[in-house]
Amino acid sequence: NAGVTQTPKFRILKIGQSMTLQCAQDMNHNYMYWYRQDPGMGLKLIYYSVGAGITDKGEVPNGYNVSRSTTEDFPLRLELAAPSQTSVYFCASSARDRVGYEQYFGPGTRLTVT
Amino acid sequence: EDQVTQSPEALRLQEGESSSLNCSYTVSGLRGLFWYRQDPGKGPEFLFTLYSAGEEKEKERLKATLTKKESFLHITAPKPEDSATYLCAVQASETSGSRLTFGEGTQLTVNP
């Protein structure tokens, strides 16, 4: 199993451009998440999904959009990129059949907006 | 609102010098407390889940413990390869989607 994969690894955007960060998991997990991590900080939840067709906002959703058309994929869309969106983005997934629901993370996408 | 505070922010140890990292939390009913390890440029790697006060879990040189207000990650005789940022997170029993609230992490450096 590849686990959670993310593409691209790095990206530089100009202010006002748009892009989609890709995330896929092959563990048949129902739950998927998008986080951002700023330097020296913990992870902040952007959006999450409890299954295909169901998404909800996290702590910091402004400027982002998500969709979940399949169990495997959970893309994150940035519209009109701003310098404040410069960060490292992590996708994670978790199963529904455990009490603790530990999350498994992808390798991250480092995004710079200039 | 759920809150997680980790201390210290950074810790330098000599190889073999045991110590502990602290995670204090406030949550409206704890479903689980999680410890992750994060290496530079990589995603967090799951270490432990603790569910109730008094519970302990071990993995190699790491031992995690839990009380009603805090968790400790004890590192016994650390090695340079234990250098990483250690993240603590909580999951509230009322949280939808099994969301986690993370602390800001403790950056551990173990010198040879």
Image: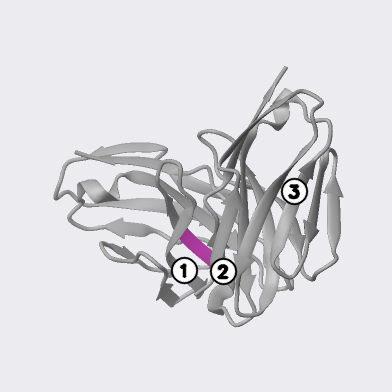
Residue B65 on the magenta segment: no
The 10 Å Cα crowd at callout 1, few under 14, some 14 to 19, many 20 or more, is: many
Observer able to see residue B110: yes
To which chain does the residue with label 2 belong? A
Please provide the residue range marked out in magenta.
A30-34
Type of residue at label 3? Leu
Gap in Å between the C-alphas at discs 1 and 2?
7 Å
Instruction: Give the residue drawn at x 54%, y 33%.
Output: B40
Gap in Å between the C-alphas at discs 1 and 3?
28 Å
Residue B75, percent from left and from top: 78, 39
Residue B111, percent from left and from top: 68, 20
User: For mark 1, what is the residue?
Assistant: A48
Which picture quadrant has residue B13?
Answer: top right
Type of residue at label 1? Tyr
Closest to the observer, B63 or B25: B25
* Mark 1 secondary-structure assignment: strand
Instruction: Give the residue drawn at x 65%, y 55%.
Output: B23
To which chain does the residue with label 3 belong? B
User: For mark 2, what is the residue?
Assistant: A31
* Mark 2 secondary-structure assignment: strand
- Which mark is drawn over residue B73? 3
Mark closest to the chain's N terminus, 1 or 2 = 2
